[in-house]
Image: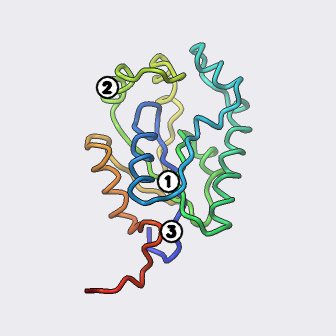
Amino acid sequence: MAKTAQQPVLVIMGVSGSGKSTVAGVLAGKLGWDLAEGDDLHPEANVAKMHSGQALSDEDRWPWLGIIADWIREHTDAGTPAIITCSALKKKYRDVLRGEGVVFVFLQGSKDKISDRLASRHGHFMPPSLLESQFEALEEPTEDENYISLCVSASPAEEADEVIERLGLRPVGAGSEASAT
């Protein structure tokens, strides 16, 4: 991705347990950008369905993806850099979200590594039993999509630093006109 004057909206994507919320939180803290947790935007029926161990269908996901797309557009239209988490497992889901100024950050890891992470996570409505369905649904981003891929083997802080470096991101208020001392 070319470095541009306008900072993007980042969609931190990947299967459940890949570290989306953690990496997004670290990025938002380092950059001072708006942050939204995509899971918080799910309709209550979706949360109940996942909590009961049922995978969501495409029909379940469309209204949720529409809410996320609206949040993204509000930020891109205003020229405000931001970060949102969303599994965005399928290309057709990302097609709803993508646009000018949107970059997907794909957190990629093995089933074993992510399964270990999920086993140690508490208080989330997505049970570890649904991980297999997430990997089955996952369509990795392709070269026609604006994305970078990160392996989830580093610490969340190191992963966030890699995103900042690779995309040339700047904290809010840090313009390109910064003077040298």
Verify CB contact (< 8 Å) between mark 1 and mark 3. Answer: no
Write down the quadrant of residue 57 in the picture. Answer: top right
Q: CA distance from mark 2 to mark 1?
A: 23 Å
Query: Secondary structure under badge 1?
Result: strand
For label 1, the residue is 104
For label 2, the residue is 112
Q: Amino acid at mark 3?
A: Gln
Query: Secondary structure under badge 3?
Result: loop
Please name the residue shown 37% across and 82% down the image: 178
The image shows residue 40 at horizontal and vertical percentages of 61, 35
The image shows residue 129 at horizontal and vertical percentages of 47, 16
Please name the residue shown 46% across and 59% down the image: 32
Query: Secondary structure under badge 2?
Result: helix
In the rendered structure, the answer to whether residue 43 lies left or right of residue 23 reads right
Q: Earlier in the sequence, mark 2 or mark 1?
A: 1
Relative to 125, is 37 above or below?
below
For label 3, the residue is 7
State which quarter of the image contains the N terminus. Answer: bottom left
Write down the quadrant of residue 161 in the picture. Answer: bottom left
